[in-house]
Every structure is written in structure tokens, then in C-alpha cells.
Image (tube, grey):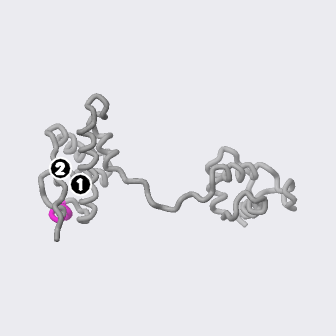
């Protein structure tokens, strides 16, 4: 049993705005594709007919159609004096990728700061018989000090790249 796609109705201004976005050279291709999807959906075609026209799957068409319709409805129902102006930036925000479901940070900001601080100490101060840190030594020392349970040399490298303080790190081993 098929479901009926959400209806999209655009004012003449909104239609013109979306069409102008699809013609702009500095707009990313994926964004033009999403805007084009909304434009075609406003004509009343079902998702399975829109998909080949815009080069997306039926599920992707449904996603962008539903997102536009929901946000547009909220926007229309909000107080005219308070709602943002309908412009390209608003369209881009509505059709932007959502926050990913990827892996969350397991190392807290406090732990990152402690690892960065550790890198400012010398290995000799930590009882190590070397003069310069390696990423592996920093990782091992952070674990031994109880800053983190585990940390890889790659994570230590990322942490140090994002800090303003730079340790003296030699080699990769």
C-alpha cells in the first residue's frame, strides 16, 4: 500500500527564489539537487516520479520533501515579525545535512587539556630516559597517569594538532 507524499505549495516569490538558487554557480551541486527536488515536488508529482528526474533515490526525495514541508509549515505559522526572512541562507539551513550519528568523543575536553599539558612537560620530568616526546610515549604516559583509560597515538596527535601549545615530538615510534 503506497502512501501519499506530503504536499508542497510555494508562493511565486518562493518559487522564484528556489529557481534562482538552482542557477547560481557558487551553490554546491548537492544543494542544487535538493532545491530542485523541492521545486519538482511542488508540482505535485509522487516521489517515485521525482527520483529519476533529480537523480536521487525515492527515499532521499521523500526525506527532502518532508523536511522542507515541515520546516516551511512551522515558518509560515510563526509570527511574521519574528520569523527569519525567506532567503537563500534559510533554504540552505533547511536543506543542510543533519548532525551525523557517528561515533561520539570518548575523550573529554578536560582530558584533552591534560594531555596537551602533559606534552609541555619533559619526558625526564616523568621519569623517562629520553629527551623528547614521541606520540606513543605521550599516549602511554597519559594512561599511566590516569588521565585516560586508553588513548591511541593517533588521538594524541589529533589533540595536539588542535591545541596552540606544541610539544617537541620526534619520530613516530
Magenta stretch, main secondary structure class: helix
Q: Regarding mark 1 in the picture, which secondary structure is present there?
A: helix
Q: Which residues are magenta?
A: 48-53
Q: Which residue occupies 25% across, 31% down?
A: 80
Q: Position of residue 107 (x, y in %)?
A: 63, 57
> In this picture, is 112 found above or below 88?
below
Of labels 1 and 2, earlier in sequence is: 2
Q: Residues within 10 Å of mark 2 (few under 14, many from 20)?
A: some
Q: Residues within 10 Å of mark 1 (few under 14, many from 20)?
A: many
Judging by the rendered image, the residue that carries numbered circle 1 is 65
Please say whether residue 173 is visible from this viewpoint.
yes
- Asked if the magenta segment contains residue 108, the reply would be no
> Pointers 1 and 2 in contact (CB under 8 A)?
yes
Q: Regarding mark 2 in the picture, which secondary structure is present there?
A: loop
Q: Quadrant of residue 153?
A: bottom right
Q: Which residue occupies 80% across, 56% down?
A: 132
Please say whether residue 171 is visible from this viewpoint.
no
Cα gap from disc 1 to disc 2, whole angstroms: 8 Å
Judging by the rendered image, the residue that carries numbered circle 2 is 8
Q: Position of residue 116 (x, y in %)?
A: 70, 50
Tell me how many marks there are: 2
Could you tell whether 127 is left or right of 12 in the image? right
Residue 23's label in the rendered image is none
| Image quadrant in which the C terminus is located | bottom right
Amino acid at each position: 500500500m503506497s502512501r501519499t507524499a506530503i504536499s508542497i505549495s510555494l508562493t511565486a516569490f518562493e518559487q522564484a527564489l528556489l529557481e534562482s538558487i538552482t542557477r547560481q554557480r557558487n551553490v554546491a551541486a548537492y544543494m542544487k539537487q535538493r532545491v530542485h527536488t523541492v521545486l519538482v515536488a511542488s508540482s505535485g508529482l509522487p516521489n517515485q516520479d521525482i527520483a529519476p528526474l533529480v537523480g536521487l533515490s525515492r527515499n532521499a526525495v521523500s526525506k527532502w520533501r518532508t523536511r522542507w514541508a515541515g520546516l516551511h509549515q512551522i515558518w509560515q505559522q510563526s509570527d511574521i515579525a519574528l520569523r527569519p526572512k525567506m532567503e537563500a541562507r534559510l533554504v540552505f539551513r533547511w536543506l543542510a545535512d543533519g548532525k551525523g550519528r557517528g561515533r561520539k568523543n570518548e575523550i573529554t575536553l578536560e582530558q584533552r587539556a591534560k594531555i596537551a599539558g602533559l606534552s609541555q612537560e619533559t619526558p625526564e620530568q616523568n621519569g623517562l630516559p629520553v629527551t623528547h616526546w614521541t606520540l606513543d610515549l605521550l599516549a602511554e604516559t597519559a594512561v599511566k597517569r590516569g588521565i585516560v583509560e586508553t588513548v591511541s597515538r593517533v588521538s594524541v596527535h589529533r589533540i595536539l594538532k588542535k591545541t596552540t601549545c606544541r610539544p617537541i615530538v620526534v619520530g613516530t615510534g
